[in-house]
Image (tube, rainbow, N blue to C red):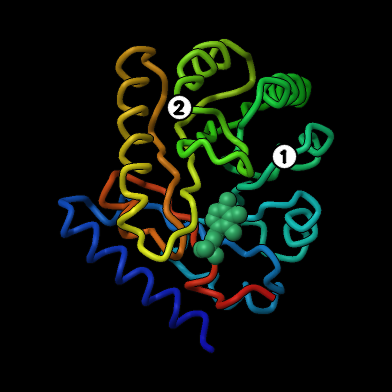
Amino acid sequence: MNVLDNLNRVRRQIAATALRAGRDPARVKLVAVTKTVPVEIIRQVLVPGLDGLGENRAQELLSKYRELPPDVEWHFIGHLQTNKVKKIIDKVSLIHSLDRWSLALEISRVACEMGLTARVLVQVNASGDKTKSGLRLQEVEEFVAEASCLPGLEICGLMTIAPWTENPEEVRPVFRQVKELSLRLRHKLKAGMDYLSMGMSGDFEVALEEGANILRIGTAIFGRRY
Ligand SMILES: *Cc1c(COP(=O)(O)O)cnc(C)c1O
């Protein structure tokens, strides 16, 4: 399997879908999700046009961070334990998974201590799936309003993981609800809602049609996980 061929195929699919939806493909970020993928394989996709690498575990991100070139843009996409915040906060360009108030407080505290501003997305559990983290749709507005006041933390948008399904059409309403929520928040709170991180290997075309501008794609590039 040639992972660079896979990456290029995914990029062509993204470009075609974006154009069909009247969107500029250049404004869609592709984050390659590298969890469980060895660094020798990851190196093969470090080409222009890839916007970043996504990891869902702090330890794995840190070890890959040390081995891969310093210009890699890292995205943290998994459940983040508060005691790991200080280890990753200065290494990642965006944390996609702000899902609770205690984490917002810890990110703010550590960012202020280190003199930086952490960019974060609020994770929304739009389907109400009990096995997933993230705020319920109706909780997000108040959370964003309050978290926006914390120093050292910049809310840049929303992230969601749709339930797994054979037919991605089934999760279109999930993506649409999160997009509508982000528009509402931008309007009401004047909150920074530049990014909408949604869409994975099985559903990225539908997510893109519904307004995603960061796609997190693993399997379609690297194959089944190791
Ligand atoms: C693993 C993972 C992905 C990528 O999933 P694929 O189906 O392999 O593309 C995207 N987002 C999150 C949060 C993940 O944990």
Query: Along the line of sight, which residue is nearer the eye, 102 or 117?
Result: 102
How many residues crowd around disc 2 within 10 Å: few (fewer than 14), some, or many (20 or more)?
Answer: some
Report the residue at 60% width, 23% height from top: 153
Q: Which residue is mark 1?
A: 80
Q: Quadrant of residue 91?
A: top right
Query: Along the line of sight, which residue is nearer the eye, 142 or 86?
Result: 142
Residue 53 visible, this angle: no
Q: In what element is the residue under mark 2?
A: helix
Q: Is mark 1 within 8 Å of ligand 1?
A: no
How far is disc 2 from disc 1 in space, using C-alphas?
A: 20 Å
For residue 220, side relative to residue 168 (left or right): right
Query: Along the line of sight, which residue is nearer the eye, 12 or 180?
Result: 180
Give x and y (percent) for residue 211. 29, 44
Residue 25 visible, this angle: yes
Whether 52 is drawn above or below 225: the answer is above
Report the residue at 58% width, 34% height from top: 134
Q: Which residue is mark 2?
A: 137
Report the residue at 49% width, 22% height from top: 140
Give x and y (percent) for residue 119. 56, 32
Whether 115 is drawn above or below 74: the answer is above
Q: In what element is the residue under mark 1?
A: loop
Report the residue at 27% width, 64% height from top: 15
Amino acid type, residue under disc 2 in the picture: Leu
Q: Which circle's residue, 2 or 1, is located before the other in the chain?
A: 1
For residue 10, side relative to residue 216 (left or right): left
Farthest residue toward the right?
83
Q: Which mark is residue 217?
A: none
Query: Along the line of sight, which residue is nearer the eye, 25 or 196?
Result: 196
